Amino acid sequence: MRRRTALRIPSGISLDAWQHLGRQIQELSNSSAWWLGDWLIYGQSEFPNRYKHAIAQTSLDYQTLRNYAWVARRFDVGQRHAGLSFQHHAEVAGLPVDERDRWLLRAAENRWSRNELRRQVRAGRELPGRTRAVPLEMTPDEVQRERWQEAARYTGSDLQTWITAVLDDAAKSAPALQS
């Protein structure tokens, strides 16, 4: 017998039955986030004040429901990986479609937990076609900044584009790069 706050398991069930029950519970748990997200998306087009009604029906807070709907909206049904959790999908939902699909495939192939997928994505592991951003910080004095800004205006560029072009030119003329 199951209740909202308890699951009573009859004594004497087999290991296979107990494992099967665990798989069913896990599938139900993982599916519920997708189902709630899809339910909210449907409600968006059919019912006004859907979040007010959803909060009353589910006892979940607004932000949780918004997250479910956002992730569900980001993945068409055919893009959802059944072998991975909703939380795996949430980790990559903000990425471009091709990148998130590659990350999810890697997570499935390597049997990564959600936390491992998060670590891999944050570490910026190289994916084909993706360059890794390198944060740079510069603090020029006022005279340098004004001179650079004027040079950028002269070339018709914004300051960042001008700085990038100057650095690229300097790198190309570096003795170590010349053959």
Image (spheres, rainbow, N blue to C red):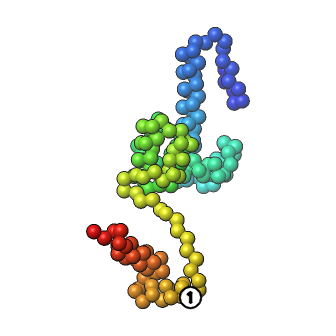
Q: Pick out the residue farthest to the top.
A: 12
Q: Quadrant of the C terminus?
A: bottom left
Residue 150 horizontal/vertical position (percent) = 48, 89
Mark 1 sits on what residue? 143
Q: Nearer the viewer, residue 33 or 92?
A: 92
**Residue 54 at x, y percent in the picture:** 64, 47
Identify the image quadrant of residue 9. Answer: top right
Residue 174 visible in rendering = yes
In the rendered image, which quarter contains the N terminus?
A: top right
> Which residue in the rendered view is the most extreme toward the left?
179
Foreground pick, 116 / 165: 165
- Which residue sits at x=53%, y=38%? 113
Rendered position, 173 above or below 88: below
| Residue at 55% in and 71% down | 137
Image coordinates of residue 4 in percent, x first then y, are: 69, 30
Can residue 42 be seen at all in this image of the molecule? Answer: no
Marker count (numbered): 1
Mark 1, other Cα within 10 Å: few <14 / some 14–19 / many ≥20: few
Q: Nearer the viewer, residue 39 or 92?
A: 92
Q: Is residue 170 left or right of residue 94?
A: left
Residue 97: x and y in percent read 42, 53
Q: Secondary structure at mark 1?
A: helix
The amino acid beneath tag 1 is Val
Q: Residue at x 51, y 44 (%)?
A: 117
Q: Is residue 4 above or below residue 44?
A: above
Image: 59 above or below 98: above
Q: Nearer the viewer, residue 77 or 177?
A: 177
In the current view of this chain or complex, which residue is farthest to the front? 175
Question: Which residue shows up at 68% across the image and 48% down it?
Answer: 61
> Quick check: 97 left or right of 65?
left
